[in-house]
């Protein structure tokens, strides 16, 4: 039996941030905690969002979100949330800020420590309540503004994916204007993150035809408009299309993801490298597509159609060519991953929740083969 669940209110277009006061009132948030990072604050995006609020609205600003959010950062942010008497969250930024905001919302609603909600130990059943959160993405990649989960690197080094319908933001304000001028490298990396979400969600074996349709539409947009967005950061149409691709990717991965994300989560926890999740997805994607090909049949035909590829074209080769065209690394070695990292990557990828919905069963040897191909 298929269970079809769709998600939250999304205001989508240039100027969407003007809806912030309305959504705060609807969510009952009177003392917002802002989860963001130093880069987003430095370029003035926090002010672009909050200028829609009355001057007397008290704001608690936390801008110390790491590129890969950690349990320690969540604890620091939550302490500030409590000390400032906040009653809800505005998450402004990329996936990292939104994930940290969701983690703070979870602690505010259900208490700590975060480790008690460990999804691998059945901790999701302990999630009873979550503080209200409004998500405002400033990149077009993760789609965390409409997703059911968040990812955190724990104090013990594990990178865990927490998921619950209660973690879906009360509202998402998707304003492409906030992505204008995003650097080329970040546009490329976040864009491939969104494209990977669409591809892996579509290939996940869970039965959800509406989500499949959303994934293919998102892929159609992302594949056509990502090169233009990278080439010209002020291209309004390309930025609109990429933000829609990002949102649709997350709407579709309610079905699940796959081995690309299992590997990216494993590599993303290498502390000495602090690698970008979207870049990792882009580099792992060709190897995983080749591995899954024998079990995907007709679905690969539909991917080719959405991507505008010729019948029988090699999808993995097309992805590798796209990565090269938009300036992403060609392999893991260029990103600093070494031979010695392989055993840990395999061990963590095998435990990651994403691998459960890969279309083909993956063994430790299979993971090693894909890692070595990407290396």
Image (cartoon, grey):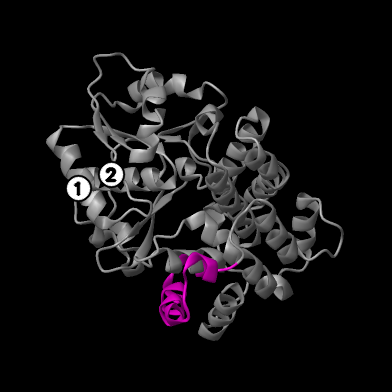
- Magenta-colored stretch includes residue 302: no
Confirm whether residue 135 shows in the render.
yes
- Magenta-colored stretch includes residue 345: yes
**Looking at the rendering, in which quadrant would you find the C terminus?**
bottom right
Q: Are marks 1 and 2 in contact (CB under 8 Å)?
A: yes
Figure label count: 2
Residue assigned mark 2:
64
Q: Which mark is residue 76?
A: 1
Residue 116 drawn above or below residue 248:
below
Residue 111 drawn above or below residue 181:
below
Q: Which residues are magenta?
A: 331-355
Q: Position of residue 207 (x, y in %)?
A: 62, 58
Secondary structure beneath label 1: helix
Confirm whether residue 205 shows in the render.
no
Q: Quadrant of residue 56?
A: top left
Q: Position of residue 224 (x, y in %)?
A: 73, 44
Residue 82 drawn above or below residue 162:
above
């Amino acid at each position: 039996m298929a269970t079809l669940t769709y998600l939250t209110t999304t205001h989508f277009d240039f100027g969407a941030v003007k809806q912030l006061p309305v959504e705060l009132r609807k969510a009952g948030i009177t003392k917002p905690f802002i989860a963001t990072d130093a880069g987003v604050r430095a370029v003035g995006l926090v002010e672009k969002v909050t200028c829609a609020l009355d001057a007397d609205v008290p704001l608690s600003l936390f801008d110390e979100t790491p590129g890969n959010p950690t349990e320690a950062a969540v604890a620091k942010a939550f302490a500030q949330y409590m000390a400032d008497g906040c009653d809800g969250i505005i998450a402004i930024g990329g996936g990292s800020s939104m994930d940290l905001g969701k983690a703070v919302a979870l602690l505010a609603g259900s208490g700590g420590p975060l480790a008690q909600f460990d999804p691998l130990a059945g901790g999701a059943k302990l999630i009873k309540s979550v503080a209200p959160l409004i998500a405002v993405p400033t990149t077009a990649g993760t789609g965390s503004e409409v997703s059911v989960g968040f990812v955190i690197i724990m104090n013990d080094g594990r990178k865990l994916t927490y998921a619950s319908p209660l973690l879906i933001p009360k509202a998402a304000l998707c304003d492409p204007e906030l992505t204008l001028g995003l650097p080329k490298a970040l546009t490329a990396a976040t864009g491939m993150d969104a494209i990977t979400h669409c591809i892996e969600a579509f290939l996940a074996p869970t039965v959800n035809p509406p989500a499949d349709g959303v994934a293919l539409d998102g892929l159609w947009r992302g594949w056509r408009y990502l090169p233009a967005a990278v080439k010209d950061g002020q291209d309004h149409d390309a930025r609109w299309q990429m933000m829609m691709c990002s949102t649709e990717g997350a709407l579709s991965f309610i079905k699940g993801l796959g081995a690309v994300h299992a590997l990216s989560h494993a590599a993303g926890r290498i502390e000495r490298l602090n690698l970008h999740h979207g870049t990792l997805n882009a580099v792992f994607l060709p190897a995983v597509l080749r591995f899954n090909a024998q079990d995907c049949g007709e679905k690969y035909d539909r991917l080719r159609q959405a991507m505008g590829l010729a019948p029988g074209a090699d999808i993995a080769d097309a992805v590798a060519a796209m990565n090269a065209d938009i300036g992403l690394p060609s392999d893991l070695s260029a990103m600093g991953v070494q031979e010695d990292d392989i055993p840990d990557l395999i061990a963590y990828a095998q435990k990651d929740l994403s691998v459960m919905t890969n279309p083909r069963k993956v063994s430790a040897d299979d993971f090693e083969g894909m890692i070595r191909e990407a290396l």
